[in-house]
Image (cartoon, rainbow, N blue to C red):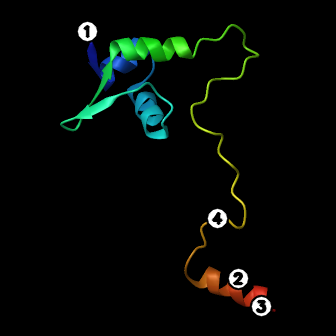
Amino acid sequence: MPWMKTPEYAAYRNISVSKANKERVAGNGAPYVKTGGVVRYDSRRVDEWLASHERRSTSEPPHSPLPAAQPATASTRRKSAGPQRKYAEARDQQ
């Protein structure tokens, strides 16, 4: 079976379909292609991806293809619109 749809991929990894979808959205799952609106996983690439995540000890840090998320700060938080923002702006001007 060279190509698997998401339910088959999830069963292969022994995870839920929801978990597979969440990993794909976050960008930390196995490589996939999307054709005709259907997500497909190449079983060979999945095996390679799994092998690249192999660890020898629980003390090893997990593999992360993406940089760690930075905590939100006052300058990076999205400012809300509406009365709360107006109140905060008026308070800050005092």
Q: Quickly name the residue at label 1.
A: 1
Q: Residues within 10 Å of mark 1 (few under 14, many from 20)?
A: few
**How many discs mark residues in the rendered view?**
4
The CA distance from mark 3 to mark 4 is 20 Å
Q: Amino acid at mark 4?
A: Arg
Of the 4 image quadrants, the one containing the C terminus is bottom right
Q: Amino acid at mark 2?
A: Ala
**Which of the marked residues, 1 or 4, is nearer the chain's N terminus?**
1
Q: Quickly name the residue at label 4.
A: 77
Q: Label 2's element? A: helix
Q: Amino acid at mark 3?
A: Gln
Q: Label 1's element? A: loop
The CA distance from mark 2 to mark 3 is 9 Å
**Which of the marked residues, 4 or 2, is nearer the chain's N terminus?**
4
Q: Quickly name the residue at label 3.
A: 93
**Residue 77 appears in which quarter of the rendering?**
bottom right
Q: Amino acid at mark 1?
A: Met
Q: Residue 82: horizontal and vertical position, in percent?
A: 55, 82
